[in-house]
Image (cartoon, rainbow, N blue to C red):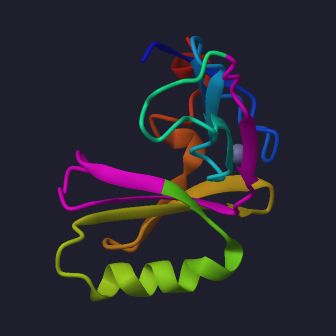
């Protein structure tokens, strides 16, 4: 599966280093923003289940997008190595924090939030926060290179 990853400005929050993953052979693409968690996808929805493509088969695409207010990351590894990440809507944040605090397995968890036009990242387990701009993702110049 050949894909090309490049940077794109997030249509929701304006972050310049959202990523777009383009599968040039199939025309599918995935956009993800790790500042606000929003994203979108264009995927083929009519692949034959048995893998036998009729001669006149043409791809049918489906576009989906999700707008979220927070990006989250969780990991069972305290260094933040292995993680899952994605976006949370405003009303999902409370549950996320509760689930992290109730879990013995999660060793690292963060979410982002916007306060007075600035983005911050909150470490749920250590109860600390810092400006998103100070993270490895924050320096758009550097990360977009
Ligand atoms: Zn965004």
**Residue at the spot 61% in from the left edge and 34% down from the top edge:** 30
Whole-percent x and y of residue 118?
Answer: 72, 53
- Whether 90 is drawn above or below 115: the answer is below
> Based on the displayed image, in which of its 4 quarters is residue 34 positioned?
top right
Q: Decide if residue 36 is on the left or right side of residue 108.
A: right
Q: Quadrant of the N terminus?
A: top left
Q: Which residue is drawn at 51% across and 63% down?
A: 111
**Residue located 61% across and 47% down the image:** 35
Residue 57 belongs to magenta span? yes
Q: In which quarter of the image is ligand 1?
A: top right
Q: Where is residue 106 in the image (x, y as percent from the top left)?
A: 24, 70
Residue 74 at what x, y percent from top left?
35, 61
Magenta stretch: includes residue 18: no
- Give the magenta-colored segment's residue range: 56-85
Q: Is residue 33 visible?
A: yes
Q: Can residue 18 be seen in this view?
A: no
- Classify 15 as above or below 122: above
Residue at x-position 63% and y-position 41%: 45
Q: From the viewer's perspective, is residue 62 above or below residue 131?
A: above
Q: Left or right of 66: which side holds 98?
A: left
Which residue occupies the foreground of this view, 88 or 40?
40
Residue that sits furthest to the front in the current view: 55
Image quarter of the C terminus? top right
Number of marks present in the image shown: 0
| Residue 141 screen position, x and y as percent | 61, 18
Q: Quadrant of residue 78?
A: bottom left
Q: Left or right: 81 with respect to 120?
A: left
Query: Does 38 sit above or below residue 18?
Result: below
């Amino acid at each position: 599966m050949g894909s090309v990853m490049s940077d794109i400005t997030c249509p929701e929050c304006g972050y310049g280093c959202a990523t777009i993953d383009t599968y040039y052979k199939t025309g599918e693409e995935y956009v993800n923003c790790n500042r606000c968690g929003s994203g979108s996808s264009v995927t083929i929805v009519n692949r034959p289940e048995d893998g036998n493509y009729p001669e006149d088969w043409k791809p049918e695409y489906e576009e989906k997008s999700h707008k979220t207010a927070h990006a989250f990351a969780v990991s069972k590894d305290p260094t933040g190595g292995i993680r899952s990440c994605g976006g949370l809507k405003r009303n999902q944040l409370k549950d996320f924090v509760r689930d992290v605090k109730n879990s013995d397995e999660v060793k690292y968890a963060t979410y982002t939030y916007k306060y007075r036009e600035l983005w911050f990242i909150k470490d749920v387990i250590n109860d600390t926060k810092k400006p998103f701009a100070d993270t490895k993702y924050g320096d758009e110049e550097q990360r977009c290179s």
